Image (cartoon, rainbow, N blue to C red):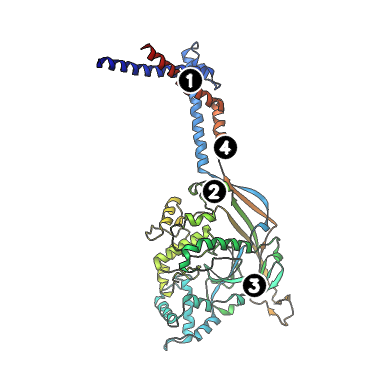
Amino acid sequence: MKKVRIQIRSDASSYSKVGCWSILKKQAAEFCSNTGLHGYKYISQTERPKAERIIWAITVLSSLCCAIVLMNMSWNYYASRPTLTVIESTHYGIWNYPFPAITVCNINRISYNLTKEFVKNLKTPPNMSKEFLIQEMRLINELLIPGTFGHDVQKNLTRLQYIIDDNRMSILDVVKLISQNCSTLLRLCRWKGTLDRCDRFFKQSFSRDGMCCSFNYYIFPEITEEKYEHLFYKEILRYRHNTENLMQRSASCGFETGMSMIINGNPDDYHATILGAYGIKVMVHHPFNYPDFNAEMQLVQLNSEHFVSINPSVMYSKPEVKNLAVSTRKCIFTDEANKILYSKVKARNLTFATYSYHNCIAECRVTFTKIKCGCIPYYFPQNSTRICNLRDVQCLKRYKSIFDTSWPMSQHDQNLSKSLQELSSIKKGPCGCIPDCSLHHYSVESSFGTLDPTLYFNEEGFSKNPRNATSMRNHSIIHVFFNDLVAFQYRQSVNYSWRNLFASFGGLLGLFAGFSLMSIFEFLYFFVIRTIIEAYFNSTKHRNVQ
């Protein structure tokens, strides 16, 4: 009895396989005879010679292979270019742009007169003269550019730091006391045609060149470490929103509608410079960006009038770009940075008002410096972190070539934030910094001429009358303004969507195989619906026969 059952089951299984294969062959023949796809009917026509049918089968298969290869190429092309940046407008009004931040730095980093006054009130060792200490104060520039003196001055630095500590002062206190302040550096300003004192527009700030004066530049104010974790991100968003409304703007072009400054270079007060020249360094940058070496820069010589024209451009990303993964679009929106880059960071080293690629790189350098030397240079905006003093110069000099580059993290460091390390390895960028999805750029063009030495100025303007006026000798005039009423606007959008792919793939299949949307329903009808129905009836008929 068992043998009979096994034999019956074996016969049923064989019948099932043969039956399914015959059904598929039958449906394939009917599909080829009735489908609208090109070439298939010639394969199923049995009255034609076998060789002809084989040739048609090879032709149809080759066409399908070509279509698949081209579809794969199309997919790879779109996958490697997920976003597309195009010029949306060449006439985007400049009133839509914030006026750029202007940071003015004296090439002379240490004022001789202020240093003389500072040393005069300083408690010094009995065996050290005041004149010698005035000369030694030039070593403060080692904190700005380690190794600037070109020889070993470690003993001198240690001795000077001991004097500063003995007077219970910090490096930041010293720098503020011996650097030329904004009121003496900037004598008179004119913003959009209105003359006024420069301290109404310019505030003391820090840049990669040390203590400077900035117009329309915003950083987040320092907060205590206790408030950091709970309130920092919320306060940053509120501060950014407020400052965006307060940013200076200009709806006109031409040097009379921008910012003009009369600057006092005072070469007689030079004591320690960052360049071997007399003059002023002017940096033009976005109001939220730290004025680093990447900022647009102009050197302004004494006794000259400079015209710095700004050609702004803006790139914005459409909301649909945000739907792409960061790893796909390779850029980040400002409001995403805190969650993506700093979600695991308990304490930020800097207090920038908003995320930008340049600010992230600056933070990266600071993080590296803090790890290696245990401090942060005084010229970075701080957040309750120890400021590097003269005893740290040796360490700063050792790592200067690393943290001054655009790729600060040259080697893997276990002390870095894990989130930054992970993103750095994924994005192949320094510290995981990701470019901005929306940004402003200010390119500059400049020209200059020699000032009239017989000119004088006062709060009312220029004249050749020296009475109640100041001579323009050793002064400079700088005009920063928009070059045109319109500028370029770029748009970043998704390069492909399901609609693009649908049209691309449909076009290729239609070209090579005459494929249409109805062909899908034909395929489903013959190979799924009819196959299932026929298999069901055949199975029922076979059981009834048994």
Q: Secondary structure at mark 4?
A: helix
Q: Residues under labels 4 and 1: Cα distance?
A: 31 Å
Estimate the spatial distance between the alpha carbons at disc 2 and disc 3, rounded to whole Å. 40 Å
Q: Which residue is mark 2?
A: 322
Mark 3 lies on residue: 200
For the residues labelled 1 and 3, the Cα–Cα distance comes to 84 Å
The answer to which of 149 and 53 lies nearer the viewer is: 53
Which residue is depicted at the point 41% across and 74% down?
391
Percent x, y of residue 546: 35, 12
The residue that disc 1 covers is 530
Picture quadrant where residue 279 is located: bottom right
The residue wearing badge 4 is 499
* Residue at position x 68%, y 62% in the image: 250
Is the N terminus in the top left, top right, bottom left or bottom right quadrant? top left
Q: Dot 1, how many residues are within 10 Å of its Cα: few (below 14), some (14-19), or many (20+)?
A: some
Sequence order check, earlier mark of 1 and 2: 2
| Residue type marked 3 | Arg
Question: Of residues 471 and 249, which is closer to you in this image?
Answer: 249
